Amino acid sequence: MHEDICILGLDKLTSLIVLPFHRKWYTDDFIESEDSVIRTLNCSVLELAPCSVGILINCGHLGRPMFSLQSSNAVAMIFLGGNDDREALIFAKRMANHSKIILTVVHLVVAGNEGDTHSDKLLDNEILKDVKLNNVDDEYVIFLEVMVKDGPQTTLIVQSMMVLIFTLTKASHYILKRHGVPMFTTQLLVGIILGPSLLGRLKIFESVFFSIKSQEIISTLSVFSYMLFLFGSGVKMDIGMIKRTGRKALFTGATSILVPLLIGLLVEMQLKTLWLEENTYTTLFLTATHCISPFPVLACLLEDLNILNSELGQLALSAAMVSNTLSLMIIIGVNLIIISKSQGSMLAAISLGSIIIYCFILAFVIRPAMFWVIRQTPEGMRVKDTYIHTILLMVLGSGYLSDLIGQSLVIGPFMLGMAIPDGPPLGSAIVNKLNSFTWDVFMPILVTTCGMRTDLSLIKFDNSLVAIHGIIIVLIVVAKVGASLIPPLFSKMPLNDSLALALLLSCKGVVQLFEYTALRDTETISDQVFALSSVSVLVTAFFWPLLVKMLYHPSRKYAGYRKRDIMHCKDNEELRILVCIHRANNIDAVTKLLEVSCLSKEKPLVVYVLHLIELIGRASPIFISHQMQKKTMSNSTSYSENVILSFNHFEKHNQDTVSVNVFTAISPLKSMHEDICTLGLDKLTSLIVLPFHRKWSTGDSVESEDSAIRSLNCSVLELAPCSVGILIDRGHLGRSMFSSQSSYSVAMIFLGGNDDREALIFAKRMANHSKIILTVVHLVAAENEGDTHWDKLLDNKLLTDIKLNNVGSEYVIFLEVMVKDGPQTVLRVRSMVNEYDLIIVGRQHNAKSPQTSGLAEWSEFPELGIMGDLLASSDLNNRTSVFVVQQQKKT
């Protein structure tokens, strides 16, 4: 058969014979069939042909209608050199004359072979030179020269880039974080430094780190990491927050995007009419990107600023939720407009229909399926890996679907994430799977490589397009800040807080940076406009957090302007106490402490119980009142069930003398103190009770320590709006106090000062209980009897009141012990510590107290004060529990 082909080619003087390849593929890229006879025929024709021969390998893509639904077709010619490559290049040049063909000529150059003068090399250079000179200005021809050594070299380059990125970002952030610069800003700065603005100008960086192959691999990793980041952000979003959003957040979120968008579009149209001959629709997406306030960006920023669950942080998250919903609609709308303009209204309608069907599937198929997964997971058990892996496969599928219908490939995964219930068990499990490699590995690559595309030297305002976009960027930022200011100011929010909120909503981050990069990579915007847009991200990401820190101090709202402590609580007034619970083993000791606080109808007790749970697997913290919000969050009641049951039993056991209200706070550990202080401020409590961070075993040895709880306690002591007590339970307090014994011994060690007086008042309240024996031990300095200091006078007045009114009571014992210095105080305390079930002390004492001289240097836990630290020491082999009291700080 080959003879027929060759004879016909010779007879008709053909220049090219085209042969089909012997393999046939399915539409899903699998091989359908092979024909060895055709392969043999092709080999014979290649050997005997009287002209050039081409073998066409059709994998299915070439067979579709090429120009019916899209505006262009991409063709590449890979050139290594030689007769055949020159022939192929001539054929490719012929294609380039077609109006809908974009030709890319990729010349692969062997490293170390640049000076070769072989005749074939000269012919190659000549034809390539012709391509460069004649087609370099043709919008449909792209010429790329790539230097390669071998395949392993590319892998080595990519690995080197990753190591360099990680090393520089970590080292830079170690320096910049001290000045309040977020990690994202550091990564972007490192990217710009590595890019063509600075180090990228060096030959070694240009040839090694900016080769086409390494850039392609890194870019693919970046897109994948961004897709996972948005999916994880979607999982963390509480879509129910939109329903619970107040008017202030609703109007703030809406105006923060709609007002700057309208202003930006109007100004852009006017400027382009005046300065540009041709108006383009593609920059609609760029203007929309300038205006958005993405929820993922704001959630990360609030966490970096440590104000995630402050009042301002909650308002900003709610407003961002509204803004993000509108942003998503706008971006989809702009994409549809671009599809309609470039590919026809029919394809835009198909894309819109696909989005509606996808949303329907998410709402009525995927989300119910996720709740089914939750129901299949026993309480306290982790979600099966099979479910997690299936969901991650769905993420990849949703990205492919988004790209298929003409939308950004990250929109599908983000919407899928929103369909997954946030928080434990499923949301937490997914986020835990993603966090380690998404945040620590992929995100630095994403941000840094986006920054590496930025060339600051290209920003020249003599270019009309760059000048227009510069004006638009500044105008939109100003409009966004102004629009975000109006609703909070109208609702009488303080100016500083309103301005901080406006800055938060106008801050740019990874979402805008990636969208700018995508527009640049698709040549929708020029490198100059991209560089300017990247600078706008850097400026807001660098300066806005610093301004927010200057304007807003979360601790300010906890300042009390009235006395809210036990000392100033009237005798016939209810005592309000907030108790914090971390684990089930905190419950017994706390309830016993409340039990001995003299529960009576004359002196009722109002207890607010706050169950604290670390925030994992969601972006927004949750605060639940189990009296008012029974169904606020799925599984919230079950997570606090033991706490609720225990304190309900405590309330029933002490009916008419105590009222209990239980709350659950799910928030990050580093900002959990804000939940405690906010609740204490709102409920006008006089005392906050915190569990100590150490847990003792039954054998008096330390079983465990939690440094996060210790940090939390220190933060509450610093910011609390009322008095604070730290309860150190060594096991004795947790037993049933009055079931098997006739009395309970309590000691109050008094040295003097505000905290000691507050502790003494609390101890006096206990003394009214019929089964409490209170001993007040007053440690007196030997040389200080005549002191007339004001604090000393207040101490004496309170102690005199105890002596006169209670000295004859069988339940109160008053002891005055003379001590010379700190070591003698330690000896006296050691000798008495085993005689009591509970010892109460104040945290701070009078300045330069002789009774504690020399002890501060040995303090292990400064948050307990000198006496508290001494009693909590592991050196004391005892089972006595300790309650350390700090009076409300003066503001």
Image: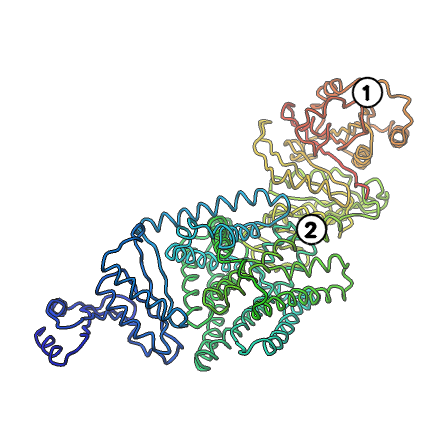
Mark 1 vs mark 2: in front: 2
Residue 53 horizontal/vertical position (percent): 18, 71
- Residue 743 or residue 19, whichever sits in front: 19
Relative height, residue 114 to residue 575 (above, below): below
Q: Quadrant where the C terminus lies?
A: top right
Which residue is denoted by mark 2 in the rendering? 549
Give the residue type at disc 1: Val
Give above or below for 96 relative to 233.
below
Instruction: Give me the residue at 18% from left, 69% from top.
Output: 22
At 48% from the left and 69% from the top, the residue drawn is: 524
State the residue at coordinates (65%, 23%).
Answer: 876
Rounded to the nearest angstrom, the CA distance separating label 1 from label 2 is: 50 Å
Q: Could you tell whether 568 is left or right of 857 in the image? A: right
Q: Which residue is mark 1?
A: 817
Residue 378 visible in the snapshot: no
Q: Earlier in the sequence, mark 1 or mark 2?
A: 2
Element at label 2: helix
